[in-house]
Amino acid sequence: MTEFINAEETTRQEIDVLVSAIRQIDTNMESIEKTCCKIDARDTFVFIKKLTEHKLDLLTLSPSYKTIARRGTTFISLTISDQRILMHQDPKLCLYDRNMNQGKQNKWIDKELWDMCWSHGIEKFIILGVKSIFLLDEHSMSIDHVYTIKGRKWLSCTCSNQLLYASTNKWGPSIMKFTLSPTMQLIKEWKHPVSCTEDEIIYDMLHKNVDLALLVDFNLDKSLRIELRSVETLDRIWSLDFGITRVQNLVFHFFSLTHNEWVAVDYQNRRLIQITKDGKIKQTVQYQTIPRHAIVVDMKKLVVPTDSVIHL
């Protein structure tokens, strides 16, 4: 028994050393990167320009140049592959190129659509329905049902090259970890209080390098925060309260930038909140209309849906 405990402790120490080393390599890579960005925004449009300095400026405003109307009861989620943007335009899933020209489409087959992400490992889109997980091939637009959860519903998802992380739609949710290849299989479930408390829900989640970022709502005071966790253990690295009191039952979203920074989309106060790699508010930009979500395209621009239109 003593030998087993010692072996387990040694394995955990080795994992911690490996995670620390990977995070340090990522930091070192940041220091030699030469590309940087500036975000221009006005109304519900954001445009990101390349600069010669390592700097991101949310305070320079510029008009949008393309608007697409949202049709019917369109779900707000969207994501991007290496080449194409996927979004829902009622009643279909539609692919757009990086200039928002519409391409292939296929009818969505579930009642609702809660979240979606792109897996480089299997080169397919992953889509969360109410209780089911689907894979979409961007070439054929075929939609395959691959997993159904029993007695619970889905809310958010993110993935690495070979793993999928999905959270359930309830107070005190679980975070489920799946393999993606050769088949999708559940390999781990983190329940509350490890995932979060029984009075909290995970609105959005993003995987990046060796970290998992969570956007969490605390039901008792309606407060919102972002947390950075270890993707292996869910140990908390840092936590940031936005100072927002939620007044509507609408999901908040956020997205990642280069250099391990994050941007929360605050539809309630019509702004973007940029967050540093160590969990500090860097700056915000105010909107005249209401952004509901956003994704980065080519590190040059953002696609920003509102309740009625999508701006590029």
Image (cartoon, rainbow, N blue to C red):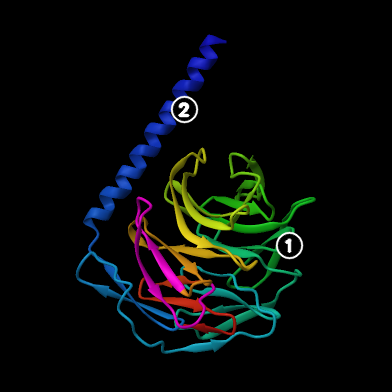
From the top left corner, tell me how far across and down residue 311 is, in percent: 48, 83
Left or right: where 223 falls relative to 285: right
Q: Can residue 137 be seen in this snapshot?
A: yes
Marks 1 and 2: CB-CB under 8 Å? no
Distance (Cα) linking label 1 and label 2? 36 Å
Q: Give the magenta part as a residue range.
A: 271-292
Q: Secondary structure at mark 1?
A: loop
Residue lying at the far right in this picture: please name it.
Answer: 151
> Quick check: 69 left or right of 33?
right
Q: Where, quadrant-wise, is the N terminus in this rendering?
A: top right
Against 269, residue 16 (above or below) is: above
Which residue is label 2 attached to? 12
The crowd level at tag 2 (other Cα within 10 Å; few <14, some 14-19, many 20+) is few
Q: Height in image: 11 above or below 245? A: above
Classify 269 as above or below 208. below
Q: Earlier in the sequence, mark 1 or mark 2?
A: 2
Farthest-out residue, front: 221
On the question of residue 206 being in view, the answer is no
Residue 212: x and y in percent read 49, 49
Residue 17 vs residue 175, the one in the foreground: 175
Residue type, mark 2 in image: Arg
Q: Residue type at mark 1?
A: Val
In the picture, the quarter occupied by the C terminus is: bottom left
Residue at the spot 25% in from the left edge and 59% down from the top edge: 33
* Residue ID for mark 1: 130
